[in-house]
Image (spheres, grey):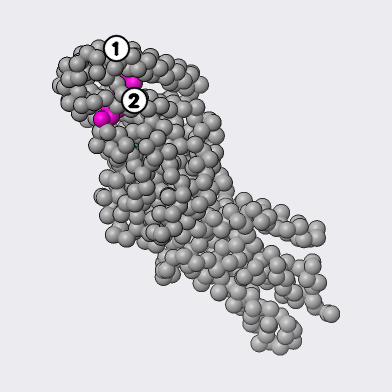
Amino acid sequence: MRGCVDASHAPSFSSSSPETTQVVIHRDVYPCCILLYLTLPACYHAPLPSTKGIIAGGRRLEGVQGDDKTSTNTARNLSATTKMIVITEKELTLLAGAGGLALYAGKQGPKCPFHRMLFAASNLVLLGGGVYVLWRSWSQSPPAFWCSLQTVRKKSRERLRGGKKARGEDAKHQDARVAAVLDLVRPNIWELEPYRCARDDYSEGILLDANENSFGSALPPEDRVLELERYPDPYQQPLKEKIAVFRNVRPEQIFVGVGSDEAIDLIMRVFCEPGRDQILVTPPTYGMYKVSAKTNDVGIVAVPLTPEFAVRVPEVLQAVAVSPRVKVIFLCSPGNPTAKLVPLEVVEQVLQGASGCMVVVDEAYVDFANANAVSACQLVEKYPNCLVLQTLSKAFGLAGIRCGMAIGHPAVIQVLNNVKAPYNVSQLTSHMAHKVFTAENLAVLQQNVSDILKEKTRVVEALQGLPAVKKIHSSDTNFILFEVPRAQEIYRDMAEAGVVARFRGHELHCKDCIRLTIGQAHENDTFLDLFKKTTEKYLGKYT
Ligand SMILES: Cc1ncc(COP(=O)(O)O)c(C=O)c1O
């Protein structure tokens, strides 16, 4: 048939199923399809998303209601986030319309001047639109742009070679999972245009863009260090690279914040609609989940741990099933105040069973428990609904600098970045955090952890020898939780005498419990001495 290209050799595209539908393209109009071919299939491998008004991977995606501005912002956010070129529905309609017209006009043949004109005009629109989409993707994220183009080229070659499947089933499932996770993001978060500063694009030269004081601070000269008159790096990329190597993840999987407390609050603001949505916690657990939930007017569903501090997985999944408003599940591993690790199999059961929720695994204390083996960081690649919280406040001994991180799917991390304050991590914090990730300093960290664990064993043994102590819970952390009658009075008495532990007796399953942080040997000795005297005072010698 004259003028037709055999479908098996022609580029194909479809707005519903890019892998299966072949479109026979008229040879005369072949060139005008190249741009459409470039823009649409560029989205195929996108590990993404679900936003109303956005087309990705050739599919119309559901999720967020919004006007054109929303679509454009979302497209912008997504193309900055992911390895894809995102095209809004409006743009697609325009390009597809122009493509259709070009096909039609080309088919009518070159003799009729009207069809020639139509052909030229529609090709022009197609060209302009295609170039615009490509330009936008490039300007948002050059690496993503190249990645997309490379994927297109690879896929073209595969197709021409005889149709090796462009994407495996696994990748499709993963896309669907990421889409489901991004659907959890509140619509207003998609609508926002992230704060951008000139420094995002230009960070060197004469910097007169941010209303800083280039005369410098009022500090004495010896304290004028680290260019403190300048705003810090908004995304802390070099620091993320160091953390990524240490945690065996990728920099784009890391959010850095003002302690993990900032991440807890951001997660709530990103995923939970105030006055409507809920988080699920497993008491006894870290108190800030509740404080953040209350601050953000987010409801709380509590599924208590067992008295042995194990997560009740069936009950958690049941609670999520009956309450579709639960958007985030907080698991604390090792727990505070429980000191107990949640086994990775349990975390995985929750991730699988509650795939419609974000599952936040708070690992503030993980470095006291062989992090490489037990950290849920190894699950973030597989489960886009997994977010791991970590901190430099505990094993790293840097509570004073306030530096924590969230580790998760890059698309989720980008959303957290879009919402955070622009310069959340200070220059002082960043400087100190950088320093700790040298081989030499990490060796000191390991030594400190090992010393703390030795001290813990010693303190536990000493407490076991005291008749007043009724139970000492096993501990995967730098603190222990133990039971002693009249705990509150003993705690108060000791605090007034200058040794401060923490009374936890009001927490579920923690009746008469004191939580003791393991300190240096002399601090622990002082604690043990005073504790012995105080328990004898309240309970007698042979309780
Ligand atoms: C379980 C848990 N998560 C998070 C935090 C807060 O850590 P950060 O200092 O990084 O805000 C704490 C602090 O005590 C904690 O116990």
Q: Is residue 513 visible?
A: yes
Q: Quadrant of residue 132?
A: bottom right
Q: Residue at x 70, y 58 (%)?
A: 166
Which amino acid lies under the numbered mark 1 shown in the image of this protein? Asp
- Residue 157 is inside the magenta segment: no
Q: Mark 1 packing: few (<14 Cα in 10 Å), some, or many (20+)? A: some
Q: Is residue 434 visible?
A: no
Q: Is mark 2 within 8 Å of ligand 1?
A: no
Image coordinates of residue 306 in percent, x first then y, are 39, 40
144 relative to 533, above or below: below
SS of the residue under disc 1? helix
- Residue 514 is inside the magenta segment: yes
Residue 77 or 246: which is nearer the viewer? Answer: 246
Image coordinates of residue 256 in percent, x first then y, are 41, 39
Q: Which residues are magenta?
A: 512-520
Residue sticking out furthest to the front: 542
Residue corresponding to mark 2: 471
N-terminal label among 1 and 2: 2
Image coordinates of residue 361 in percent, x first then y, are 44, 41
Residue 266 or 540: which is nearer the viewer? Answer: 540
Residue corresponding to mark 1: 525
238 relative to 439, above or below: below
Residue 245 or 265: which is nearer the viewer? Answer: 265
Q: Mark 1 against mark 2, which lies toward the viewer?
A: 2
Q: Residue at x 46, y 20 (%)?
A: 446
Residue 100 or 488: which is nearer the viewer? Answer: 488
320 relative to 19, above or below: above
230 relative to 442, above or below: below
Q: Quadrant of the N terminus?
A: bottom right
